[in-house]
Amino acid sequence: MDQAIDTRQLRAFVRLARSGSFTQTGRELHLTQSAVSHAIKSLETDLGSSLFHRQGKRVHLTHAGRELLPHAESILQSMSHARSVLGTLDQTPRGKLKIGCTTTAAQFILPTVLREFKESFPLYDIKVTCGETPDTIDRLVNNEVDLAVSLKPLDVSRLNCHVIFDDELEFLVSPLHRWAHERPKLKDAMNETFIVASRNSLNFSMVQEYFLKNGVRLNSFIELGSSEATVELAKLGIGVAIAARWIARTEIDAGQLIALPLPKSKLKRRWIVSTLKSRPLNLPERTFIGLCEEVGRRMGDGKP
């Protein structure tokens, strides 16, 4: 027959075949004797066969009943296995994810990553601790965070580094700044005021090293504490920011800032998610890394 068999009727059939008693079957299934009897009659009607010989209060399988029993048991076993598998899939993982990151990563990278992460792991608690790259890596090494989103540090001997994207540092200047009309030379940087987020950052160290290698010492700085504030001050023409253009993409597109390449050579950076080599990753952590890599591909292309 093409009509599907009701699994509740099959369950009553199997229990009755094993116990031989409507009363016992009802007790096991938490049903009345009448409900069990009705289920069996409905099943027999659907199949067009008598499944039990009734002898007083006891029942025994007919030939058709004996033929059906192994199939019914197999169907119920398969159903039970399916529920078990689906139940496992439905058990949304619970846990905590401790993330260390720079303030720039927290502002530009993590919002999209965390939104998509919470869709997959809604019961996970997330804690984000911000700091400059050296502090963030120290927290990772000291097991204070599970993953670190930062610039690639000099020492990666204890780290597994998952590349997010590469970028390039440039001068960001107001359209009214003199450099917007006359491209600067390296020596011009000696007399300029530079707007920086933090002197304790790896970014600042890279900039200092770049100019010192080219025989130029930067002398004047305004330290603000955030990339967003750096961009705002550069827009006012008070000084020059040295940053990746994706940090100020909106302002550059609007003509409020101009990105100029550094005079001598390019200054490249690499953004990574790092984990400790000695520590295996679970599924949520691997998912987080994958989301960072996906967002990084868009960031590296200059896309939102």
Image (cartoon, helix red, strand yellow):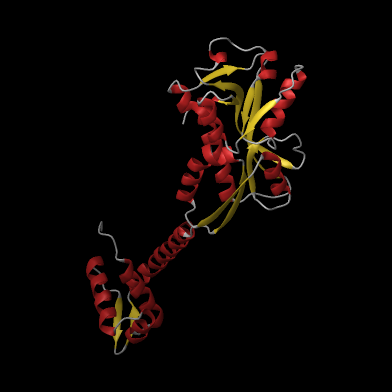
Specify whether 210 is left or right of 26: right
Q: Among all residues in the image, which is located at the extreme bottom?
A: 56
Front in this rendered view, residue 12 or 283: 283
Q: How many marks?
A: 0
For residue 291, say whether it is visible.
Answer: no
Residue at the image position 75 percent from the left and 34 percent from the top: 154
Front in this rendered view, residue 56 or 261: 261
Residue 223 higher or lower than 137, as above or below: above
Residue at the image position 23 percent from the left and 72 percent from the top: 42
For residue 136, say whether it is visible.
Answer: yes
Where residue 163 sits, quadrant-wise, is top right
- What percent of the width, then of the height, locates residue 101? 61, 43
Front in this rendered view, residue 25 or 297: 297
Specify whether 232 is left or right of 193: left
Quadrant location of the N terminus? bottom left
Residue at the image position 34 percent from the left and 75 percent from the top: 12
- What percent of the width, then of the height, locates residue 166? 61, 27
Residue 88 higher or lower than 69, as above or below: above
- What percent of the width, then of the height, locates residue 60? 35, 81
Residue 161 higher or lower than 83, as above or below: above
Q: Among all residues in the image, which is located at the extreme top?
A: 182
Where residue 221 sits, quadrant-wise, is top right
- What percent of the width, then of the height, locates residue 211? 72, 21
Front in this rendered view, residue 222 or 200: 222
Specify whether 203 is left or right of 257: right
Specify whether 18 is left or right of 1: right
